[in-house]
Image (tube, rainbow, N blue to C red):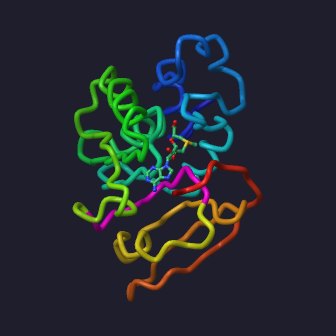
Amino acid sequence: MKLDAVAAAMVAVDRADFVTSDWREHAAEDRPLPIGLGQTNSQPRTVANMLRLLEVLPGHHVLDVGAGSGWTTALLAHLVGPDGSVIGVELEPALAEWGAGNLASYPMPWARLLPARPETLGWPDEAPYDCILVSAQAPALPPSLVEQLRPGGIMVIPVRSIMLRVQTTDEGSPEVTRHGGYRFVPLR
Ligand SMILES: C[S@@+](CC[C@H](N)C(=O)[O-])C[C@H]1O[C@@H](n2cnc3c(N)ncnc32)[C@H](O)[C@@H]1O
């Protein structure tokens, strides 16, 4: 059976490399796993659903908000390939350092994991992005992240427990579709 790109990325990037040693034997289980500081490495089925909604292609320039362990950053890096680029940002400095170390164990220098700046949502410095993945739940669709999408770009973000797919029009306004209920840690 031929795997789609998302399934192939999940085979190529081993989740066990993105959890702490005491949780490694649980890495194949379809549930969120704790990564410290009250945060989690997300449930694999949820991540796969989000990545499929995001429609990442080789060569894309992608932002990963809430990069945590680095797993989603590595999955996105596999999907964009060496002609693309991925920037992961993580608000907890200790997680950002650990996640960057996890990511560095994969030879994908077109992906970086950086500490987020607390006063700035996303990473406007290198906008616009083809795709933005947000792995933490927002109380409302953040306009500042919509502004970081290129026209026609796609963002996947949980808002008030509903997974939203947001695609900007040529004029930059967001067209939103809803894709089911999910629980996430809060976007801060
Ligand atoms: C579900 S967890 C990590 C999931 C991650 N993608 C992974 O693969 O491990 C979500 C992360 O979002 C981070 N976070 C929350 N608000 C953020 C913000 N404004 N900017 C960047 N990261 C944020 C949290 O610290 C947490 O580590």
Q: Is residue 168 magenta?
A: no
Please state the total of marks drawn on the protein image.
0
- Tell me the residue at 61%/38% (across/down): 42
Q: Which residues are magenta?
A: 127-137
User: From the viewer's perspective, is residue 153 above or below residue 25?
Assistant: below
Figure quadrant of the N terminus: top right
Coordinates of residue 59 in the picture (x, y in percent): 29, 51
Coordinates of residue 165 in the picture (x, y in percent): 59, 66
Q: Nearer the viewer, residue 69 or 149?
A: 69
Residue 2 sits in which quadrant? top right
Q: Residue furthest right?
A: 181
- Tell me the residue at 54%/34% (across/down): 37
Coordinates of residue 184 in the picture (x, y in percent): 66, 49
- Tell me the residue at 60%/36% (across/down): 38
User: From the viewer's perspective, is residue 104 above or below residue 93?
Assistant: above
User: From the viewer's perspective, is residue 10 above or below residue 166?
Assistant: above
Residue 177 sits in which quadrant? bottom right
Q: Is residue 136 magenta?
A: yes
Q: Nearer the viewer, residue 57 or 69?
A: 69
Q: Residue furthest bottom?
A: 171
Q: Is residue 85 left or right of residue 63?
A: left
Q: Nearer the viewer, residue 141 or 154?
A: 141
Q: Is residue 30 left or right of residue 82?
A: right
Coordinates of residue 97 in the picture (x, y in percent): 34, 31
- Tell me the residue at 64%/28% (across/down): 33
